[in-house]
Amino acid sequence: MTAETATPRSAQARWRARTGPPLSAYGVYVALLLLVVVNVVVTPSFLSAANLRLQLVQTVPVLVVALGMALVIGTEGIDLSVGSVMAIAAALIPLYLGYGAATAIVVSLVAGAAAGLLSGSLVTFAGIQPIVATLALLIGGRGLAIVIAHGQLKQIYNPQLLALGSDNVAGVPLTVLVAAVLVVAVGLLVGRTTFGRQLVAVGGNRKAAEFAGLPVRRVLLVVYMLSGVLAAVAGVLATARLNSSDPSNLGQLIELSAITAVVVGGTPLSGGRVRVVGTVAGALLMQLITATLIAHNVPASVTQMVEAAIIAVAVLLQREGRAGA
Amino acid sequence: MIALIQRHGALAVLVVLLAVGGLSFDTFLTPYSLTNMAVQATFLAVVALGMTMVIITGGIDLSVGSVYALAGVLAAYGSARWGLAGGLLLPLAVSGLIGLTQGVLVARGRMAPFIVTLCGLLFARGLLQLVTVEGSMTYQVPDSSALRTVGQGTVLVAIAVVCYLLGGAVLQRTPFGMRLFAIGGNEDAASLMGLPVARTKVSVYLMSGLLAGLAGVMQTAQSGSGVTNIGVGLELSAIAAAVIGGTMLTGGSGAVSGTLAGVALLSVIRELINQLGIDSNMQNVVSGAVLIIVVVLQTLLTRARRRASEVEHVPQ
């Protein structure tokens, strides 16, 4: 986004630096815990298995998209195209379902990777700002998805795909398991691999990473491709759960929810750090806030305004943390 | 030469497209069709003007689509209750307030414009839902209201033209306009030179909010009712128009004339696709592709120019 200006170190900022780790490092977990406790007390049957399952299932699409978004934001980029990539993935499923569910899913994921490769190439080779490159794909991708599907919502009848959306394993929905596996995979990728280190290095200081001989372009390409694939996964999971492929509406504005989950989870928009667990907590927090307010008959309008205020406060706290870092 | 293409590339493409359209379709270059296109483009044009100024300072305003829709609803609500004054003042006051708050958070709170205006997007959309009782109420502008006269095509186009003339004059001919470029070019340098950076940035977000609000009022004046589900994605079209028109998202450069050409280009593409009878969703595919092509060209041209100027300045 905008160039991060070097904040003049005020006495206030120096004082903050001495007062230990910033609140933002733990804020999201504290908030999530508080919200759970409040809900256990005030929301009837909050702890019922059915409700917990519902909350988790509803978090899945945003969470999966947010994982990819966290990686992209870690490189000081942003991916606005995720919702449109979800729509393209969903639009492709009915076309290839005749060859079996597995084929349809693979085609969707390949399309997601291709979309990521396109935006990644624009960012790396053409040197276009991530926000513009992915904005173009956001605008064009949605149109393409609708054109592919001839503007129609298509019901899904394939039993395997429907099972992916509705089956439980030991009481845990399959989609949640898939999301959990992806969280662990992305967590390991960021924390335990060379690629993860390189990603963070590129986000922290691209010039320095280049001078250090890191494969900056390859890292960026792979990161945008991962974001595209994860968005496609979210599109497949959502389609399976909704029993229909709906390219006109699927994933609308999900880029904003995903960015919110990532930022509230403590990943700075300025790059150089990826918090995977924080992103999970951020996605759960935003889902719980919405669910709590709706459970208590707060109108959707006020819910949205509260969400806006929460994002603003979270980022304000984070900004103070950064000034002290 | 390179600078010239960069500045007027959109205009050149626009002229070519108009010529192609005019030769291909008898109904394309008719006064009726052109007027229609101009009227339909006024709303985006007014929004994109504010967006251009924000982008020149190195910021971005994602809230304009929501503010546009909110102002439209408030214009209908206000005109039904308090007549023309209510229909104008209520939406402008609210959209101005939203812009002002965003500006203060960006300039004084030193928060990322992307996030602040993202919150503004959600907040304004929520407020719109609240005002319309979760989207179930549609306020109508009374037929007798003077607001309806504002909604005539010629008046709308006149408003947009005046906005652009004023905007161009402010950007090119006033100290305030110079400050926008200075801040976008290098905020720290602008600050060290003693320019009132924070105050300027606040004003720019205020102006963007006001212009988005004005566009909403214009749209309601034309349609006669406060439509609740409009303006989604308008911010993206506005950004696209500004970028196609040669305004760099990195800040520090841009011109309102380019943005106007960008808006016109997007409208002509839409009209051409309509005329061709292609699926209207292809319009978005083409707009996205045009955006990519223009930005890639811009980047290449900027690199070429930088290389050229380096050669000039280093004679050894």
Image: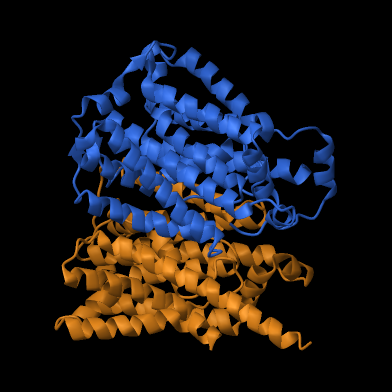
Chain colours: A blue, B orange
Camera-nearest residue between B55 and A126: A126
Viewport quadrant of the N terminus of chain A: bottom right
Give how far across and how far down residue B77 sits, in percent: 31, 54
**Does A12 sit left or right of B166 as displayed?**
right
Viewport quadrant of the C terminus of chain A: top right
Residue A288, above or below B28? above
Residue A178, above or below B164? above
**Does A143 sit left or right of A219 as displayed?**
left
- Regarding residue A296, the answer to whether it shows in the image is no
Which residue does the image show at 48% across and 80% down from the upper left? B166
Which residue does the image show at 29% across and 44% down from the upper left? A249
**Does B205 sit left or right of A19 as displayed?**
left
Q: Residue B219 sits in which quadrant? A: bottom left
Q: Residue A57 sits in which quadrant? A: top left
- Regarding residue A183, the answer to whether it shows in the image is yes
**Does A108 sit left or right of B153 as displayed?**
right
Give how far across and how far down residue B1 sits, in percent: 53, 89
Give how far across and how far down residue B309 sits, in percent: 67, 83
Camera-nearest residue between A19 and B127: A19
Camera-nearest residue between A308 and A197: A197
Give how far across and how far down residue A307 sits, in percent: 48, 38
Which residue does the image show at 51% across and 86% down from the upper left? B4
